């Protein structure tokens, strides 16, 4: 091998005994820190967020260096997959106007909420997840899981959001035109708490893009590639992802690459 590589045998053995250079030592330490940060994100973070995690931990580094070292180590964030819509909008129930019109900005907490439903598979059957997201903090403030995709599912998610935010009024609550959101129970809940119900245009998923994006992220980072034998196992994963990983640790580009709860603590003066 030494003959093929054009080096002397004595030089090779001398290299084996030689202590690593300062540059090599620093590179090994940096690689280890990058790997630890990547694993702490449960292999969900790409190089930009790993770089920000290192900066927050007091480790100065270049984002291009982080990207190249991750590539060298084979550290890749979980890949995306497509998912299907679950909206049943072929009904004769009353429809609310589309006041949001794809304006997902908010100037204050409890100004605009968005809600949606998705489905999750386990070996015992389907579980349906309904969520409520505050557009100012981007936190999931209400959610509900059920084996039935009905009005109770969305009412429970909205009720959790109301309790968590101490029952604010005049909040715009946007959803799609699904029969669950058009139901008498859900519409009465909006009315009882002085909330402003609004709905997407027919067949336009972009009108509820924030909620769709959250479901996409949830499935990519916590669901796809996993096998869930029982519902309770899947419920635990959803709870941990929403309440711990997403709300408290996952960085969100819309709010300055901060986790929703950290953003709320710094910029919102309410409980």
Image: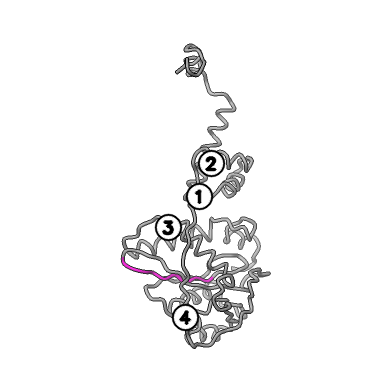
Real-space Cα distance between discs 4 and 2?
44 Å
* Image position, residue 225 (x, y; %): 40, 55
Q: In the rendered structure, are the residues bearing label 3 and label 2 in contact, judged by CB atoms less than 8 Å apart? A: no
What segment carries the magenta color? 124-132
Mark 3 or mark 4: whose residue is earlier in sequence: 4
Helix, strand or loop at disc 1?
Answer: loop
Q: What residue is disc 4 on? A: 180
Mark 1 or mark 2: whose residue is earlier in sequence: 2
Quadrant of the rendering where the C terminus is positioned? bottom right
Q: What residue is disc 1 on? A: 77
- Comparing 7 with 73, the one in front is 7
Mark 3 or mark 2: whose residue is earlier in sequence: 2
Q: Which residue is drawn at 50% across and 49% down?
A: 77
Q: What residue is disc 3 on? A: 224
Helix, strand or loop at disc 4?
Answer: helix
Which class describes the residues within 10 Å of circle 2: few (<14), some (14-19), or many (20+)? many
Real-space Cα distance between discs 3 and 4?
26 Å
Q: Residue 70 carries which label?
A: 2
Q: In which quarter of the image is residue 138?
A: bottom right
Give the prevailing secondary structure in the magenta stretch: strand
* Image position, residue 180 (x, y; %): 47, 80
Mark 1 or mark 4: whose residue is earlier in sequence: 1
Mark 3 or mark 1: whose residue is earlier in sequence: 1
């Amino acid at each position: 091998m030494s003959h093929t590589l054009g080096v002397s045998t004595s030089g090779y053995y001398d290299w084996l005994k030689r202590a690593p250079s300062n540059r090599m030592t620093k590179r090994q330490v940096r690689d280890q820190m990058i790997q630890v940060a990547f694993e702490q994100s449960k292999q969900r973070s790409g190089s930009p967020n790993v770089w920000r995690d290192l900066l927050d931990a007091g480790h100065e580094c270049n984002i291009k260096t982080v990207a190249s070292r991750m590539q060298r180590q084979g550290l890749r964030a979980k890949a995306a997959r497509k998912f299907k819509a679950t909206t049943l909008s072929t009904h004769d129930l009353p429809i609310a106007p589309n006041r949001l019109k794809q304006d997902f900005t908010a100037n204050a907490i409890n100004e605009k909420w968005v809600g949606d439903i998705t489905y999750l598979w386990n070996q015992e059957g389907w579980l349906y997840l309904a969520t409520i997201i505050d557009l100012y903090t981007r936190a999931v403030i209400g959610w509900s899981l059920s084996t039935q995709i009905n009005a109770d599912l969305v009412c429970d998610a909205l009720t959790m959001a109301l309790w968590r935010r101490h029952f604010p009024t005049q909040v715009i609550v946007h959803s799609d035109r699904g029969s669950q959101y058009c139901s008498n129970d859900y519409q009465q809940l909006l009315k009882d708490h002085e909330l402003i119900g609004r709905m997407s245009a027919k067949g336009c998923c972009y009108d509820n893009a924030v909620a769709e994006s959250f479901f996409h992220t949830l499935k990519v980072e916590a669901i796809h590639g996993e096998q869930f034998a029982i519902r309770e196992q899947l419920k635990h994963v959803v709870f941990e992802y929403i309440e711990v990983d997403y709300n408290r640790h996952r960085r969100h580009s819309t709010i300055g690459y901060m986790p929703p709860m950290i953003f709320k603590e710094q910029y919102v003066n309410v409980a």
